[in-house]
Amino acid sequence: MGQAASQSVSAAPSAPASCPIDHSANKPASPSGPAKCPIDHSAKAAPAQAPAQCPISHDTDGLNPLNQMPTLSQAPAAHQAVALPTERETSSIPRDESSRWEYPSPQQFYNALVRKGWETPEEHVETMVHIHNFLNEEAWQEILKWERRENPRDALPHLARFKGRPGELSPKARLWLFAGWLLPARFNTEPPFDRHDWIVRRPNGEEVRYVIDYYSAPPEPDGSPVFSLDVRPALDSVGSIKQRILAATEEVWANFREESKRNSSQGAR
């Protein structure tokens, strides 16, 4: 697949998940520096304001009818110095009742980077693929949480199709950026480094669009990158609006009960 996700994601950005790759042997000089996209975009010839984006094309044109994925070459790129694996990992994300989506191989991922003009050392590509796949899996788990809340007894939904929209900020992302501009000490001031729209097909045939904003979070003390996802149903149907309102209400009440319990505990001392 061509998208990427983090642990514990909810209607709002929540506790971020650490990268699954051990980076302890490659600590940056300043672990407290700003977090960034796991893909090095420094060599890309693009305007200074161009947003970071996933190197895998998410366009609907040129899809392979066998796997609903863009056709990516498995042949080594020109001037490639290191051989890369061509095996593709099968995800846990169902495409239909009998098959699952496949992730691009390291060679395909590298070819996509080359096509985009990103000069990435070949030895880093496999790590990047691990991160890419990890983020996708976490995004799907967050979607399943929403779906189980809505249909706890139904069979699992399928991911019908998806699209990367890295150059488009969602309304919620714009709201968070505005909050960060007003209160930079409390809210994130960096935009998401990527955005995807996933179309999920429920067992009854209904299709629901989910929006996923991908954020970088402050790195671990050892320099390992950390990511946070904001996964939620898009506000384009009555059912999705109801889901979002109920989830927000549940979160408010949960915080209120937790605060009341804490105050009661302190008063009893």
Image (cartoon, rainbow, N blue to C red):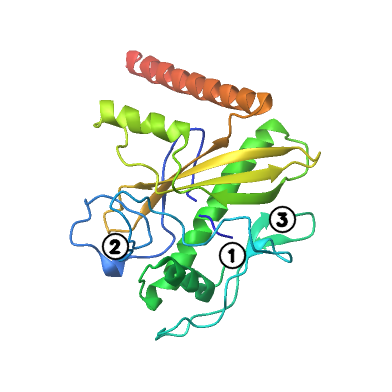
Query: How many other residues sit within 10 Å of disc 2, few (<14), some (14-19) or many (≥20)?
Result: few
* Residue located beneath label 1 in the image: 103
Which is closer to the viewer, label 2 or label 1? 2
Quarter of the rendering containing residue 86: bottom right
Q: Residue at x 73, y 34 (%)?
A: 151
* Residue located beneath label 3 in the image: 95
Rounded to the nearest angstrom, the CA distance separating label 2 from label 1 is 25 Å
* Residue located beneath label 2 in the image: 42
Question: Count the marks: how many?
Answer: 3
Can you say which quadrant of the picture contains the N terminus?
bottom right
Relative to residue 64, is residue 247 depicted above or below? above
Residue 149, position in %: x, y? 66, 32
Can you say which quadrant of the picture contains the C terminus?
top left
Quarter of the rendering containing residue 15: top left
Rounded to the nearest angstrom, the CA distance separating label 3 from label 2 is 35 Å
Q: Secondary structure at mark 2?
A: loop
Amino acid, disc 3: Arg
Query: How many other residues sit within 10 Å of disc 1, few (<14), some (14-19) or many (≥20)?
Result: many
Q: Residue at x 58, y 56 (%)?
A: 59
Q: Secondary structure at mark 1?
A: loop
Amino acid, disc 1: Tyr
